[in-house]
Image (cartoon, helix red, strand yellow):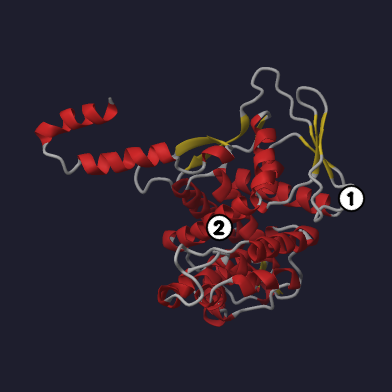
């Protein structure tokens, strides 16, 4: 994906790397750079509220998309088929979903006040679409992490891979792209990363409702498999390997090239990006699953050869050692299993939270009696 245009080598740099980084910082303003969104994404942009479009095009979301895209630019493979199909899918979903709160009809005074807060949240996608292809690839990663990991852990993963990528670039012996030089010398706060992650989660909630049938079928498939997302032990290595692998596989599927997998990264990808290839599952006996997604070219068949006689049926799991999960303390290894069904709070869980809030206000001597009467 990275081109030779704009690449600097050590012979053209100023004598010290520090001077070069300072120069790049002065001359490259991420917030000022904007590109025309690909045609496939235009319908999504037209469905966003004016406030969300402004956030995506000229505010914090855009800056985050530009910084992350520049930071990982030279690491990314070309995936044009995936980028086009993802744009068509998000536009299709955006046009099919109407988010209107009860009582807010076209003439509602309240709607005129809250109008810019209503509607779908595709802010991170539009920010990426107006920031370049590399930013769209980074938004695909945002959806993977938001799909698999709780918010706190996903933000910690972002913080760790950003730091690791900067360290990796610093070892390139002066061979940088101009945007990479600037990205190395910029910062991304946890607040910015949290905002980026939150927008991706909001989009997944909207898209999951729109594609409820397909997502339910995919969940049932994944629940009956047993696989890990990536065998790599380090957080940066594992996340980047899963990200690049899933993009390449889905890009080929969209183009009609059959693929065979033995790990779970691509399954998380197709779930997070709402693209549904026909599949052949070999675990427990061959099964053909026809999803007939019009965005998958004929021939794009995904063969899932995930065999595990001892642990079948545990779904897709992923373990990462997170050094950024806590501000203080040692590195924490976290393990999660993919489960679309349990990503939201149930009504029963919400009721327990409400009960706990009410009980907090009761006098101490009444707590036990009231709780006993409610629970019985």
Task: Name the spot of residue 279 as percent of width and height, x first.
Answer: 80, 39
Question: Which comes sooner in the sequence, label 2 or label 1?
Answer: 2
Residue 245 in sight from this viewpoint: yes
Q: In x, y percent, where is residue 320?
A: 54, 39
How many neighbours does mark 2 have within 10 angstroms: few (below 14), some (14-19), or many (20 or more)?
Answer: many
Residue located 19% across and 32% down the image: 370
Seen at 67% across and 53% down, the residue is 273
Tell me the quarter of the picture where residue 136 sits: bottom right
**SS of the residue at dot 1?**
loop
Count how many numbered circles sit on residues in the image.
2
Out of 164 and 324, give the one closest to the viewer: 324
With 36 as the anchor, is 338 left or right in this view? left
- Residue 171: image location, x then y, percent: 61, 58
Residue 94 sits in which quadrant?
bottom right
In the displayed structure, does residue 246 sit left or right of residue 345?
A: right
Q: Secondary structure at mark 2?
A: helix
- Give the quadrant of residue 309: top right
- Crowd class of label 1 (few under 14; some 14 to 19; many from 20; radius 10 Å): some
Q: Is residue 173 visible?
A: no
The image shows residue 234, relative to residue 113, as above or below, that is: above
Q: Residue beneath label 2, please?
A: 200
Which one is nearer the viewer's eye here, 322 or 280? 280
Mark 2, mark 1: which one is toward the viewer? 1
- The quadrant the N terminus occupies is bottom right
Image quadrant holding the C terminus, namely top left
The residue positioned 48% from the left and 74% from the top of the image is 116
Q: Which residue is mark 1?
A: 298
As drawn, is 73 to the left or to the right of 105? right
Give how far across and how far down residue 352 sits, in percent. Answer: 33, 37
Gap between marks 2 and 1 measured at Cα:
29 Å
**Where is 35 relative to 104, above or below?**
below
């Amino acid at each position: 994906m990275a081109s030779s245009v704009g690449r600097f080598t050590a012979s053209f740099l100023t004598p010290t790397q520090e001077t070069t980084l300072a120069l790049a910082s002065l001359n490259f303003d991420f917030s000022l750079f904007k590109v025309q969104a690909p045609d496939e994404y235009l319908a999504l942009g037209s469905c966003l509220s004016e406030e969300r479009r402004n956030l995506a095009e000229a505010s914090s979301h855009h800056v985050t998309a530009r910084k992350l895209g520049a930071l990982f630019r030279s690491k990314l493979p070309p995936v044009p088929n995936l980028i086009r199909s993802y744009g068509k899918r998000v536009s299709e979903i955006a046009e099919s979903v109407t988010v209107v709160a009860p009582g807010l009809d076209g003439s509602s005074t309240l709607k005129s006040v809250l109008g810019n807060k209503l509607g779908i949240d595709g802010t991170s996608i539009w920010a990426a679409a107006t920031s370049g292809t590399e930013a769209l690839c980074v938004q695909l990663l945002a959806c993977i992490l938001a799909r698999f990991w709780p918010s706190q852990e996903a933000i910690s993963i972002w913080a760790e891979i950003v730091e690791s990528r900067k360290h990796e670039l610093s070892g390139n012996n002066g061979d940088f792209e101009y945007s990479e030089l600037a990205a190395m010398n910029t910062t991304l706060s946890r607040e910015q990363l949290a905002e980026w992650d939150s927008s991706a989660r909001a989009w997944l909630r909207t898209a999951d409702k729109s594609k409820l049938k397909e997502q339910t079928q995919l969940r049932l498939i994944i629940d009956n498999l047993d696989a890990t997302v990536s065998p790599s032990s380090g957080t940066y290595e594992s996340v980047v390997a899963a990200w690049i692998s899933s993009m390449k596989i889905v890009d080929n599927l969209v183009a009609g090239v059959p693929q065979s997998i033995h790990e779970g990264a691509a399954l998380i990808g197709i779930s997070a990006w709402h693209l549904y290839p026909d599949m052949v599952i070999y675990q427990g006996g061959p099964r053909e699953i026809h999803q007939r997604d019009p965005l998958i070219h004929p021939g794009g068949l995904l063969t899932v050869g995930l065999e595990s006689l001892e642990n079948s049926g545990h779904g897709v799991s992923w373990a990462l050692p997170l050094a950024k999960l806590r501000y203080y303390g040692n590195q924490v290894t976290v393990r999660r299993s993919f489960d679309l069904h349990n990503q939201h709070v149930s009504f029963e869980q919400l009721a327990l939270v409400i009960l706990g809030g009410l009980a907090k206000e009761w006098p101490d001597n009444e707590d036990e009696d009231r709780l006993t009467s409610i629970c019985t």
